Amino acid sequence: MRKKFSFVIFNCLLVLVLAASLFVAGCGEEEPAVPEKTEITIGGSRPLTGDGAIYEQTAFGPIYKMWIDDVNARGGLYIEEYGKKLPIAEPIIYDNGSDIATMTRQLERLMTVDKVDIVLPPAGTAFLFAAAPIFNKHGYVLLGAEGGATTITDQLPSLPYFFGVLNYSDRYQMPVLADIFVEVGVEKVAMIWLQDLHGIEYSGVATVEFDKAGIEVVMSKSVPMAVEDVSLLLLQAQALDADALCVFAYPPQCFLTVGTAAAMGINFDAILLGPGGCFAAFPDAFGPAVEGVMFEGAWNCNSTPGAAEFCEEFYSVYPPAIADWWGHLLYQGAIEFFEHAIVEAGTLDHSVIREVMATSTFDTVLGPTWFDQIGEGGCLLAIECHPGEIGQWQNGSPEVIDPGAHRTAEPVYPKPDWPTAP
């Protein structure tokens, strides 16, 4: 009995000794090392083909590509967590074919299969609307690019990872347009709008703002994405004696409308175009016929101290024909802000980056740049950071015609007649 009791005591002592030795050994161990990382991975679902391809070619596409090249030329971004600069890897860009359902599948793949560090925004208002919940679910910052956020605004308290960049219909493009129309004497407006989130939002907000300003909307007609003929709508607007025509649509419809109006000799004292009118491809396509045409935007190389430097750098990389006089300065300012936030956060953890973005001000090509947080949720680029709301082509150059400090030229009104064919 005594031997059995001694054996039990011996075993208990052995267990205690082993436990103590493991505890001491554990206390002497260093914290687990941060996993080795050699580059920042990046990806996106972008419209390389389809109706939205022009955005990848001339809008945010050139900006993010130039940014990646610029960062890598500087040796990468210094990330404190890894104690070194990390270059940005060749981005994984999936072609969504300008299709929303395809985009949603590709975003899920980028976040759950490819597990990239940064996911680029999709292009288009409806695409941003569909993408925002996906980014939020997986905890990725959605730095908005091409697309407004009128419909998303009410949802921002529950979308903390959304950071809207572009100015849009009621922030404050249509209120400013109404002010300009009152200033120059517009009394009647005709609207052609796309059966898409952009067209629905802009036509709705414009109707409200024109009504407030005492401007009559004499025609409001929608067109499908694949519209091929707007001649009857132009004739109707002319018959109703509209002073101004607003085309709340995308580049294919905007180009079609201007080309048709010029060919038919139907002119209005003011014409405003949605996305497409802001692209340098517009005057390249129509030449002197663009004189006096207004567009949603706007900025030019004199808008901010950093704008001239940006123009110089941009034109050293890309031909002037792909300039975007609505979005480029905003996209550049936003991506510079994003870079500052990543470096300030010292990590690629988006929850940390998001908090820095929501609470910080950084200097960018826009000047001091910050975002307004909506409740405890998502954010919108501060209105004070907008370089302009409405632009106009004058002597082949884009001008900001907002009333107030951002104005770079007085509005041309009435718009000149279409040039006669030689």
Image (tube, rainbow, N blue to C red):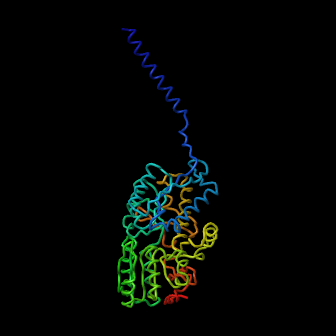
Q: Nearer the viewer, residue 253 or 346?
A: 253
Can you name the residue that lies furthest to the front here? 422
Question: Can residue 16 be spotted in the picture?
Answer: yes
Q: Quadrant of the N terminus?
A: top left
**To which quarter of the image does residue 8 belong?**
top left
Q: Residue 278, how many percent across, how many down?
A: 51, 75
The residue at the point 37 percent across, 90 percent down is 239
Q: Residue 206, how many percent across, how many down?
A: 39, 79
Disc tally is: 0
Q: Nearer the viewer, residue 416 or 17?
A: 416
**To which quarter of the image does residue 101 belong?**
bottom left
Q: Residue 343, how many percent across, how many down?
A: 57, 56
Q: Quadrant of the C terminus?
A: bottom right
Question: Can residue 267 be spotted in the picture?
Answer: no
374 lies left or right of 62: left
Q: Nearer the viewer, residue 403 or 359?
A: 403
On screen, residue 405 above or below 47: below
On screen, residue 364 above or below 87: below
Q: Residue 197, how many percent across, how many down?
A: 38, 70
